[in-house]
Amino acid sequence: MQYALYYWTGIQGRGEFVRLALEDAGADYVDMARVHGDAVMQPFLDGHNEGAQPFAPPFLKAGRQVIAQVAAILDFLGPTLDLVPQAASRRMQALQWQLTIADLVAEVHDTHHPIAASKYYEDQKTEAKARAAAMRGERLPKFLGYFEQVLKANGGRHPLREHSYVDLSLFQLLSGLDYMFPRRMQALWPTLPLLRALKDRVQQRPGIAAYLASERRLAFNSNGIFRHYPELDSER
Protein backbone atom coordinates (compact mmCIF):
# COMPACT_ATOMS: atom_id res chain seq x y z
CA MET A 1 0.00 0.00 0.00
CA GLN A 2 1.13 3.52 -0.71
CA TYR A 3 0.59 5.92 2.17
CA ALA A 4 -0.01 9.66 1.90
CA LEU A 5 1.50 11.77 4.67
CA TYR A 6 0.21 15.28 5.24
CA TYR A 7 2.29 17.78 7.19
CA TRP A 8 3.43 21.39 6.78
CA THR A 9 6.35 22.04 4.44
CA GLY A 10 9.49 23.53 5.93
CA ILE A 11 8.57 22.66 9.51
CA GLN A 12 10.57 20.12 11.52
CA GLY A 13 7.80 19.12 13.87
CA ARG A 14 5.46 16.30 14.82
CA GLY A 15 5.33 14.94 11.27
CA GLU A 16 8.93 13.84 11.66
CA PHE A 17 7.93 11.12 14.13
CA VAL A 18 5.80 9.58 11.39
CA ARG A 19 8.40 10.05 8.65
CA LEU A 20 11.00 8.16 10.68
CA ALA A 21 8.72 5.13 10.95
CA LEU A 22 7.96 5.16 7.22
CA GLU A 23 11.62 5.63 6.29
CA ASP A 24 12.90 2.98 8.71
CA ALA A 25 10.49 0.42 7.29
CA GLY A 26 11.16 1.38 3.67
CA ALA A 27 7.44 2.07 3.20
CA ASP A 28 6.00 3.46 -0.02
CA TYR A 29 4.71 6.92 0.84
CA VAL A 30 4.20 10.38 -0.63
CA ASP A 31 4.87 13.51 1.40
CA MET A 32 1.85 15.29 -0.02
CA ALA A 33 2.48 18.91 0.98
CA ARG A 34 6.06 18.75 -0.23
CA VAL A 35 4.80 17.58 -3.61
CA HIS A 36 1.61 19.61 -3.94
CA GLY A 37 1.97 22.45 -1.42
CA ASP A 38 0.34 23.03 1.96
CA ALA A 39 -3.05 23.78 0.38
CA VAL A 40 -3.48 20.07 -0.36
CA MET A 41 -4.32 19.56 3.33
CA GLN A 42 -7.14 22.08 3.54
CA PRO A 43 -10.00 19.95 2.17
CA PHE A 44 -9.28 17.37 4.89
CA LEU A 45 -9.06 20.02 7.61
CA ASP A 46 -12.36 21.51 6.39
CA GLY A 47 -14.05 18.10 6.48
CA HIS A 48 -14.60 17.93 2.71
CA ASN A 49 -12.79 14.62 2.16
CA GLU A 50 -13.86 11.12 3.06
CA GLY A 51 -12.55 9.70 6.30
CA ALA A 52 -12.35 11.14 9.79
CA GLN A 53 -11.77 14.91 9.85
CA PRO A 54 -8.36 15.71 11.38
CA PHE A 55 -7.98 18.67 13.70
CA ALA A 56 -4.46 19.44 12.45
CA PRO A 57 -1.56 17.76 10.66
CA PRO A 58 0.17 15.41 10.72
CA PHE A 59 -2.35 12.97 9.36
CA LEU A 60 -2.03 9.89 7.19
CA LYS A 61 -4.25 8.58 4.41
CA ALA A 62 -4.20 4.83 3.93
CA GLY A 63 -6.76 3.71 1.38
CA ARG A 64 -9.98 5.34 2.55
CA GLN A 65 -8.82 5.76 6.12
CA VAL A 66 -7.59 9.06 7.48
CA ILE A 67 -5.66 8.81 10.75
CA ALA A 68 -4.55 11.85 12.74
CA GLN A 69 -2.45 12.31 15.90
CA VAL A 70 1.09 10.92 15.94
CA ALA A 71 0.44 8.18 18.50
CA ALA A 72 -2.65 6.95 16.64
CA ILE A 73 -0.80 6.98 13.31
CA LEU A 74 2.11 4.96 14.72
CA ASP A 75 -0.26 2.53 16.44
CA PHE A 76 -1.95 2.03 13.06
CA LEU A 77 1.29 1.64 11.10
CA GLY A 78 3.17 -0.42 13.67
CA PRO A 79 1.80 -3.90 12.95
CA THR A 80 1.90 -3.50 9.16
CA LEU A 81 5.43 -2.09 9.10
CA ASP A 82 6.69 -4.59 11.70
CA LEU A 83 7.44 -1.75 14.10
CA VAL A 84 5.53 -3.14 17.07
CA PRO A 85 4.99 -6.66 18.44
CA GLN A 86 1.71 -8.27 17.38
CA ALA A 87 0.51 -9.08 20.91
CA ALA A 88 -2.20 -6.65 22.03
CA SER A 89 -0.55 -6.15 25.42
CA ARG A 90 2.79 -5.17 23.83
CA ARG A 91 1.06 -2.90 21.34
CA MET A 92 -0.70 -1.14 24.21
CA GLN A 93 2.62 -0.77 26.00
CA ALA A 94 4.14 0.89 22.93
CA LEU A 95 1.18 3.24 22.65
CA GLN A 96 1.50 4.18 26.32
CA TRP A 97 5.14 5.14 25.84
CA GLN A 98 4.39 7.02 22.64
CA LEU A 99 1.76 9.07 24.45
CA THR A 100 4.27 9.82 27.20
CA ILE A 101 6.68 11.07 24.53
CA ALA A 102 3.83 13.20 23.17
CA ASP A 103 3.35 14.71 26.64
CA LEU A 104 6.98 15.82 26.71
CA VAL A 105 6.82 17.13 23.14
CA ALA A 106 3.85 19.30 24.14
CA GLU A 107 5.82 20.67 27.08
CA VAL A 108 8.78 21.34 24.78
CA HIS A 109 6.55 23.44 22.53
CA ASP A 110 5.13 25.32 25.49
CA THR A 111 8.64 26.18 26.68
CA HIS A 112 9.09 28.74 23.91
CA HIS A 113 5.36 29.54 23.61
CA PRO A 114 4.18 29.50 27.25
CA ILE A 115 1.42 32.10 26.88
CA ALA A 116 -0.13 31.45 23.46
CA ALA A 117 0.81 29.53 20.33
CA SER A 118 -0.63 32.40 18.29
CA LYS A 119 1.88 34.92 19.68
CA TYR A 120 5.49 35.25 18.56
CA TYR A 121 8.23 34.01 20.84
CA GLU A 122 9.49 37.58 21.09
CA ASP A 123 6.17 38.57 22.70
CA GLN A 124 6.59 36.09 25.58
CA LYS A 125 10.33 35.88 26.17
CA THR A 126 10.15 36.70 29.87
CA GLU A 127 7.64 33.92 30.50
CA ALA A 128 9.62 31.56 28.26
CA LYS A 129 12.74 32.08 30.36
CA ALA A 130 10.91 31.00 33.49
CA ARG A 131 9.29 28.05 31.72
CA ALA A 132 12.64 26.95 30.27
CA ALA A 133 14.26 26.95 33.71
CA ALA A 134 11.57 24.59 34.98
CA MET A 135 11.92 22.42 31.87
CA ARG A 136 15.69 22.12 32.23
CA GLY A 137 15.74 21.65 35.98
CA GLU A 138 12.64 19.54 36.61
CA ARG A 139 10.84 18.16 33.59
CA LEU A 140 13.71 16.91 31.42
CA PRO A 141 15.35 14.91 34.24
CA LYS A 142 11.96 13.47 35.19
CA PHE A 143 10.90 12.38 31.70
CA LEU A 144 14.30 11.25 30.46
CA GLY A 145 15.07 9.53 33.75
CA TYR A 146 11.82 7.62 33.38
CA PHE A 147 12.76 6.36 29.92
CA GLU A 148 16.24 5.45 31.13
CA GLN A 149 14.55 3.30 33.79
CA VAL A 150 12.27 1.74 31.18
CA LEU A 151 15.27 0.72 29.10
CA LYS A 152 17.11 -0.69 32.10
CA ALA A 153 14.07 -2.73 33.13
CA ASN A 154 13.77 -4.24 29.65
CA GLY A 155 17.28 -5.37 28.89
CA GLY A 156 18.95 -2.04 28.14
CA ARG A 157 18.55 -1.83 24.38
CA HIS A 158 14.87 -1.33 23.53
CA PRO A 159 11.82 -0.32 25.59
CA LEU A 160 9.91 -3.30 24.14
CA ARG A 161 12.97 -5.60 24.17
CA GLU A 162 12.96 -5.41 20.35
CA HIS A 163 13.10 -2.62 17.81
CA SER A 164 9.88 -0.62 17.55
CA TYR A 165 8.53 2.78 16.62
CA VAL A 166 9.15 3.81 20.23
CA ASP A 167 12.91 3.57 19.57
CA LEU A 168 12.50 5.85 16.55
CA SER A 169 10.43 8.37 18.47
CA LEU A 170 12.95 8.46 21.31
CA PHE A 171 15.65 9.12 18.72
CA GLN A 172 13.71 12.09 17.34
CA LEU A 173 12.96 13.38 20.81
CA LEU A 174 16.60 13.15 21.93
CA SER A 175 17.88 14.67 18.69
CA GLY A 176 15.49 17.58 19.10
CA LEU A 177 16.47 18.16 22.71
CA ASP A 178 20.16 18.06 21.75
CA TYR A 179 19.45 20.87 19.28
CA MET A 180 17.21 22.87 21.60
CA PHE A 181 19.20 22.57 24.84
CA PRO A 182 22.77 21.60 23.88
CA ARG A 183 24.31 22.80 27.17
CA ARG A 184 21.67 21.14 29.35
CA MET A 185 21.78 17.86 27.42
CA GLN A 186 25.57 17.81 27.62
CA ALA A 187 25.18 17.88 31.40
CA LEU A 188 22.43 15.24 31.42
CA TRP A 189 23.95 12.69 29.02
CA PRO A 190 26.24 11.07 31.63
CA THR A 191 23.11 10.15 33.62
CA LEU A 192 21.42 8.65 30.52
CA PRO A 193 23.86 6.09 29.07
CA LEU A 194 21.17 3.72 27.79
CA LEU A 195 19.23 6.46 26.03
CA ARG A 196 22.39 7.80 24.46
CA ALA A 197 23.31 4.34 23.18
CA LEU A 198 19.79 3.87 21.78
CA LYS A 199 20.05 7.20 19.94
CA ASP A 200 23.36 6.15 18.40
CA ARG A 201 22.01 2.75 17.33
CA VAL A 202 18.91 4.19 15.68
CA GLN A 203 21.01 6.70 13.78
CA GLN A 204 23.01 3.82 12.30
CA ARG A 205 20.02 1.80 11.08
CA PRO A 206 20.24 1.55 7.26
CA GLY A 207 16.90 3.20 6.50
CA ILE A 208 17.44 5.96 9.04
CA ALA A 209 21.06 6.62 8.04
CA ALA A 210 20.00 6.97 4.39
CA TYR A 211 17.14 9.26 5.34
CA LEU A 212 19.27 11.50 7.56
CA ALA A 213 21.78 11.90 4.71
CA SER A 214 19.06 12.79 2.20
CA GLU A 215 17.34 16.06 1.32
CA ARG A 216 14.10 14.63 2.73
CA ARG A 217 15.35 15.17 6.28
CA LEU A 218 14.78 18.78 7.27
CA ALA A 219 17.27 20.37 9.63
CA PHE A 220 15.95 21.54 12.98
CA ASN A 221 14.96 25.18 12.63
CA SER A 222 13.11 28.06 14.27
CA ASN A 223 9.78 26.98 12.72
CA GLY A 224 9.59 23.61 14.46
CA ILE A 225 8.82 22.33 17.93
CA PHE A 226 12.48 22.00 18.93
CA ARG A 227 13.87 25.54 18.71
CA HIS A 228 17.26 26.70 19.90
CA TYR A 229 17.21 30.04 21.68
CA PRO A 230 20.56 30.47 23.50
CA GLU A 231 18.95 32.50 26.25
CA LEU A 232 16.75 29.53 27.18
CA ASP A 233 19.63 27.06 27.53
CA SER A 234 21.89 26.46 30.51
CA GLU A 235 23.83 23.61 32.08
CA ARG A 236 21.24 23.48 34.87
Image: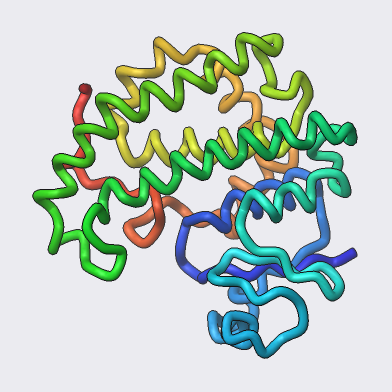
Give x and y (percent) for residue 2: 85, 66
Residue drawn at point x = 23 percent, y = 32 percent: 134
107 in relation to 32, above or below: above
Using the rendered view, name the quadrant where residue 221 is placed.
Answer: bottom left
Residue drawn at point x = 19 percent, y = 33 percent: 133
111 in relation to 149, above or below: below
Give x and y (percent) for residue 54: 61, 72
Residue drawn at point x = 31 percent, y = 32 percent: 182
Using the rendered view, name the quadrant where residue 24 is placed.
Answer: top right
Give x and y (percent) for residue 73: 70, 55
132 in relation to 149, above or below: below
Looking at the image, residue 34 sits to the left or right of residue 107; the answer is: right
Give x and y (percent) for residue 186: 33, 22
Q: Number of numbered discs present?
A: 0
Q: Which corner quadrant holds the C terminus?
A: top left
Rendered image coloring scheme = rainbow
Residue drawn at point x = 31 percent, y = 64 percent: 117
Question: Viewer-proximal residue, 91 or 31?
Answer: 91
Q: Which corner quadrant holds the N terminus?
A: bottom right
Q: Residue furthest left?
A: 126
